[in-house]
Image: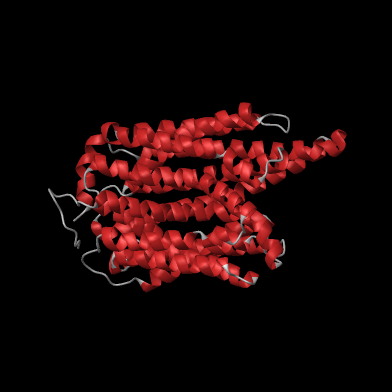
Amino acid sequence: MSKKPVVDGLDPTRWRTLFVVAISQLMLVLDSSIMNIAIPSAKIDLGISDANQQWVITAYTLAFGSLLLLGGRVGDYMGRKKIFLIGLIGFAAASALGGIASTQGLLFASRALQGVFGALLAPAALAIISVTFTVPAERAKAFGVIGAISGGGAAIGLILGGTLTEFFSWRWCLGVNTPIAIVAAILAIKFVHESKAEGNNTYDIPGVITATAGLFSLTYGFNEAATKGWSSSTTISFLLAAAVLLVIFVVIEMKVANPLMPLRVVTERNRGGSYLGSLVVGAGLFSMFLFLGLYLQVILGYSPLKSGFAFLPFTAGIIVFAGIASQLLPRIGPKPLMVPGLIFAGIGLLMLTRITPDTSYTTHVLPSLLIMSSGMALVFIPLTSTSLHAVSSHDTGVASAMLNTSQQIGGSLGTALLNTVAATATTTYVAAHSELGKMVQPFAMTHGFTVAFKFSAVLLFAGAVVLFFFINIGKESLVETEGVSIH
């Protein structure tokens, strides 16, 4: 049910709509990395203990990851523009609250609120792009812009976070979202047109409860694994609870008349493969930022701001190759871009395994970043497109939410899994090289990072295999079906 004026079947304000959605997407992506830089200053200012510091990040990821599916469905039913605006205004308010937080409790609460409104905003943004752009070549360009922002925004967040923290205050890492969100909301009122799911719009309450609780338990379990280890009773309890709740959720979805996550969304092979690929990419890529950031700051002694700038070539590579990918997608289809892209990115990660405390950024880090970014850009854009392949208008929001959810869960899983891998490798190295004395620590830490990079590369190669076997749409199918996704 769309209320948009059309000229020759095309929305005349579609490129302005893309601009508005791009602003909101950039804000969400920045927020995932900008606070990492601000944590040390916020700890001193608000007296946050080492044990509690993880909540600055975890409060956001828990709320965001567990509510995405519900956020996607709410957008489908209540209207994507309406929910997009509510998400923007809520995100602006939550960010302002965090910026003036006087206690750690208030900061954590504001971060959780950001996650809640982010879970409304992210699926609505992708769904708006999907229903606004009906021509495959234009849609590929639109997803190219969103893909470039998703891939490169994290590095921009590190630079912006470093600049704001160093020259102003950590509080601006939150406060900066407020004016951005308000401007985006004002523009959205004018340029974004409303669209809704047709047909049965009743909510699947048992599905909402089990999915939200299951995703919360899964994300929290992975967070606990990253900090306390996989054998911790809390980790095991939450992961078991997640497994039980998510199995119950699937059973409910098979039986109810109007499910929260219709299984038809994930059982179509191209979409299912895209979500699985997205989970693996999220796990592999998130660890690259985490461990490479630690290497630059702890081992090479870079300041937070300098390490943010060190990631800039990655952002530049994503932007350049996203443009190329968006041109090639309608001509050659998704698989010939995604599979080589993941192999390239995996090779880039393997190149990072050569770093030591004595190697330089220019010779050992820079080439890897450029190869990885070129590969990942070829993945991001087609992956967004195939994840929404031939999905009905009724399910656009929830299909978008599924992509975001798989990335979010992948990031949490990657952090937990690879933290354990790196820590174990570091401990083993220290035990085996006691003759190095005090010098052992930087070498042991770097060894831990390189082992984590190997595992990350394996994850990306596994993603290439998944996409090779699952994705079977060519450029003709892409052209035929992408126009069908708007009923």
Q: Residue at x 29, y 51 (%)?
A: 16
Residue 100 visible in the picture: yes
Q: Is residue 223 above or below residue 157?
A: below
- Left or right of 114 on screen, residue 394: left
User: Residue shown at 38%/51% (left/top)?
Assistant: 22
Q: Is residue 465 above or below residue 392?
A: above
- Residue 374, picture quadrant: top left
Where is the N terminus found, in terms of image quarters? Answer: bottom left
| Residue 54 picture location, percent across and down | 64, 60
**Percent position of residue 436, x then y:** 85, 34
Question: Which corner quadrant of the image does residue 265 belong to?
Answer: bottom left
**Residue at position x 73%, y 41% in the image:** 426
Q: Quadrant of the C terminus?
A: bottom left
- Which residue of the protein is positioned furthest toward the left in this rendering? 8
364 horizontally vs 10: left or right: right
Q: How many marks?
A: 0
Nearest the eye: 434 or 109: 109
**Residue 26 vertical placement versus 138 (above, below):** below
- Return the residue found at the far front: 167
Q: Position of residue 359 (x, y in %)?
A: 69, 29
Res. 465 in view: no
Across and down, in percent, residue 121 comes to 39, 61
Identify the colour scheme used.
Answer: secondary structure
